[in-house]
Structure formats: C-alpha cells, structure tokens
Image (spheres, rainbow, N blue to C red):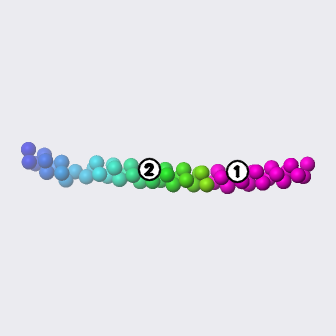
Amino acid sequence: MIKHFVSFMNDESGATAIEYGLIAALISVALITGASALGSALNTQFNALSTKLNYAG
C-alpha cells in the first residue's frame, strides 16, 4: 500500500496536463487579442477607403 502511495505522489503526469492546458489558454487569449486588434485596424482602413470612394464618385 505504501508503494502505491509513493508512486502516486511521484506521478507528475497530471501536473504536466494542467501546464499544457494553461499554455493553450494563454495562447488562445493572445490569438483572440491579436485578431481583435487586426479586425479593428482593418475596419478603420475599409471605412477610410469607403469614404474616399464616396467622395470620388
């Protein structure tokens, strides 16, 4: 029984899975933030282009 307990206490596979989950969550947050910033920049550019086209026609 003590062998199983010691083996359980030395098993780090669950900690590794949690670390990978945290890394994936941080990458997801970074991607969402970047996509949001890119979307805002593109929206600004398309609005400026639209305004220029309206004045040209």
- Label 2 crowd (10 A; few <14 / some 14-19 / many >=20): few
Left or right of residue 15, residue 54 in this image = right
* Image quarter (top left, top right, bottom left or bottom right) of the N terminus: top left
Amino acid under disc 1: Asn
Q: CA distance from mark 2 to mark 1?
A: 27 Å
Precedes in sequence: disc 2 or disc 1: 2
Question: Residue 18 appears at what percent x and percent y?
Answer: 34, 50
Residue at x 70%, y 50% (from the top left corner): 43
Q: Which contiguous range is marked in magenta? A: 38-57
Question: Residue 34 appears at what percent x and percent y?
Answer: 57, 55
Amino acid under disc 2: Ala
Mark 1 element type: helix
Return the residue found at the far right.
57
Residue at x 54%, y 50% (from the top left corner): 32
Q: Secondary structure of the magenta portion, mostly?
A: helix
Residue at the disc numbered 2: 25
Return the residue found at the far top.
1
Left or right of residue 27, residue 40 in this image = right
Left or right of residue 15, residue 4 in this image = left
